[in-house]
Image (spheres, rainbow, N blue to C red):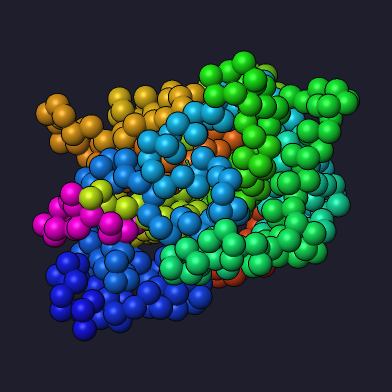
Amino acid sequence: CYNLFLHPLRKVPGPLLAALSPFWQIYHFLGSHQHLEHIKLHEKYGHIVRVSPNTVIINDSTYFAEWSNWDKADWWLALRADPVHLAHSNYHDVKEHSRRKKLIMGGYQLSAILKNESTMDKHILTWTDQLQARVGTVIDFAPFTQYAAFDIVMDMVFSKPLGFLATASDVDGVISSLHGLLTSANIMALLPVLSKIIFTPWIFRYLAPKHTDKTGPGKVHGLAYAIVRQRYKDLQESAVQHNDILQWIIDKNNPDSENGPMPWPVLEQESLGPILAGSDSVAAHLRAVVLYVSTNPRVLVRLRAEIDAADEKGALSKIPQFQEVRKHVPYVDLIMKEAMRIYPIVGSPLPKEVPKAGTVINGYFIPGGTSVGISQWAVTRNKEIFGDDVEVFRPERWEDATAAGAEAQDALDEIETESRYTPSETPDEEEAKRRLRDSGYVPFSLGPMMCTGRNIATMEIYKITTQLFRLFDFQIVNAIQPWKEANKMAMVQWDFFVKVTERA
Ligand code: HEM
């Protein structure tokens, strides 16, 4: 009764059952198609929808800049692996979060990872060799994308690829454990009271997954902890000199630095981030790229024209280098943006918390403490932002970068990227449309909590997209229903059957 008639959010439109209890959201999450439900909700109720007693989702990009500077909502508590030691991404308070993120973010900067580009190249080569060995056959393309993304991120961050690509298998069941963890974490995230109970230190001691577990969350946590412990041992014995992100963090947070050394349990938590977030994301995107480019001949022809022209000039290395692609195959950037738009990778609205004083969104007063999320699937279907052809894969919609868009491209190297939506001067109509379009481009989110791994992801996507279409043709076996999919916070697809042939 309170939630319906007395709650401060009672006037915000949305389904009756959602206003009554958080189980409405859990029901839709378990149905795996929460993201599609969000599209329908915004179509039915408008730019702001109440999806649980204390949560609303929005798809009006005018509010994104303000949103991006709020604290994390309680939803995120479930993504912790420890009640005491936290990674930057576990901090609720935006200021503390930014302070912690600065301690590690330099390792993820473009300038730092470019120094290690050859590590990425090794895995791209192994992947294309694996595809070469399967030319002429129908394969399930889905696992290969994750094997590649997982080996790359493990090698770039820890110098520890697990050999998914080389063995063409889910080594030790790590990927299935990761997917199990994502499902359970998301359910807990939708019931923050449960997270609060479980992460009470004395309760956590009894319920915590064990690092020795053979499957499930414990296995994934155990992987991060084993890597950090091994590094500690290597350093004591000065056995190996590593050139990776973990080492960058250790070196930067040295005993003489302002903050002193990073405690090992915190380093363990920081090491979980790339394991949890670094493979499903890139893999889901690459599957979408292969599907949409292969089924849009016009796009494929334009992409190949750029690749071939670059090859004729000798401008692309055997494994295309990031800066080569940036300069000579710029269409890849438009393809990436459009694939992120038509098939957003993040399927959950990742809420932040309205500050104490409250705020007004689309005419509704939203009190402090409310969780507000952005449903990327609904933003990218917002016709006011992207026009009537939202269901069409058209990379050209991203052409004519606005000054702000171009800056965002160059800002890849910056630690924090401010909102790209700057409604200050008086732009002409076309410029205003482009700015609006750019304001709806939030696949990596924006502001201080923007994706930590966005530069690794962008580099992988540029290089792999170029190389795959440089070498192969992909015939999608079932273009109407190309794969099975579930929204596990990130989108996960499987049974994506594709016939691989050498490029005609
Ligand atoms: C296509 C690929 C990817 C997409 C679309 C993506 C998207 C996102 C989004 C939307 C967020 C949430 C930001 C927020 O809270 O507002 C995020 C956070 C994060 N991502 Fe990614 N991501 C990708 C790849 C990666 C990779 C490769 C890594 C690791 C190497 C990574 C590590 C992280 C981490 C650690 C956070 C937490 C950031 C924070 O709290 O400050 N992501 N990502």
Position of residue 503 relative to residue 55, above or below, is: above
Q: Nearer the viewer, residue 130 or 116?
A: 116
- For the point 39% across and 49% down, which residue is it? 72
Quarter of the image for residue 43 reads bottom left
- Residue located 78% across and 40% down the image: 229
What residue range appears in magenta? 357-374
Q: Position of residue 299 (x, y in %)?
A: 50, 44
As drawn, 468 above or below 121 = below
Residue 444's quadrant in the figure? top left
The image quadrant where one finds the C terminus is top right
* Magenta-drawn stretch contains 364: yes
Which percent across, then down, holds residue 264?
Answer: 68, 37
Q: Image height check: is 500 above or below 113?
A: below
80 on left or right of 223: left
* Nearer to me, 316 or 304: 316
Q: Which residue is at 23% across, 76% downward?
A: 3
Q: Does residue 142 appear to the left or right of 344 in the view shown?
A: right
Q: Position of residue 99 (x, y in %)?
A: 45, 31
Q: Farthest residue in the front direction?
A: 202
Foreground: 266 or 117?
Answer: 266
255 horizontally vs 225: left or right: left
Q: Is residue 368 visible?
A: yes
Question: Residue 150: x, y in percent?
Answer: 70, 47
- The answer to whether residue 304 shows anywhere in this view is no
How many numbered markers are drawn? 0
Q: Which quadrant would the N terminus be assigned to in this image?
A: bottom left
Q: Residue at x 56, y 30 (%)?
A: 104
